[in-house]
Image (spheres, helix red, strand yellow):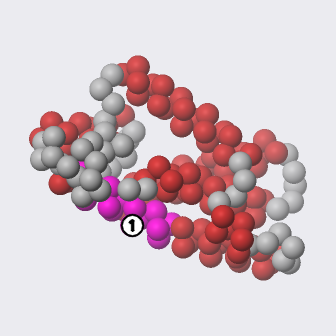
Amino acid sequence: MPQLLSGRTQPRWWPVGTKGSIVRASLSLLLASAVVPLLPLPAPAAEVCSSSQSTVAETGCVIAALKTMDQTLEKALARVAKEAKEVPSEVFQTLWRDNLTGFYKTSADPKAQASAFRAERRKICAYAKSMAFQGTGYGIFTTRCELALTQTLLDQLKP
């Protein structure tokens, strides 16, 4: 197989060949999404958005950090899509698209992927907040959760 731009011969996100592997991968993602709120914040948000700020200042800070991280995510997804298009294999292209559109009910378009990720991320973080059962800090909690989930995905998309 020819080398990709990154020098690897096979991308990390290569479609999984067996249904059992897909189920295991899905279960791993589900488990990771349940644990992410327990993990420390990604470095940029933790460094920039101190909880010693006023609530208004902290809220503005985490929202700005999330917007910046979302822009980074869109660029990373575009890079992955570009790498996928450069793989000279019709079989790979079909598997990649079918995996995204069929199993994951999303799109091969990076902007649509980012939008779908943001929607699911909001749901997961709202659910996590409801489990924490604390009445204050909803916006800050959920935005920090969204930052952590986005950082986790960005870490997986690194070249």
On screen, residue 52 versus residue 118, left or right, reads: right
Q: In the rendered image, which quarter is residue 111 located in?
A: bottom left
The magenta segment: 70-84
Q: Amino acid at mark 1?
A: Lys
Instruction: In the rendered view, tell whether residue 95 sits above or below residue 49.
Output: above
Name the residue rendered at 27%, 53% in the picture.
7
Q: Quadrant of the C terminus?
A: bottom left
Residue 14: x, y in percent? Answer: 31, 39
Determine whether the residue tagged by mark 1 lies in a helix, strand or loop.
helix
Residue that mark 1 sits on: 75
Residue 37: x, y in percent? Answer: 71, 48
Residue 49: x, y in percent? Answer: 74, 72
On screen, residue 158 versus residue 121, left or right, reads: left
Residue 105: x, y in percent? Answer: 38, 41
Please name whichever residue, 57 or 154, is drawn nearer the observer in this view of the structure. 154
On screen, residue 142 versus residue 99, left or right, reads: right
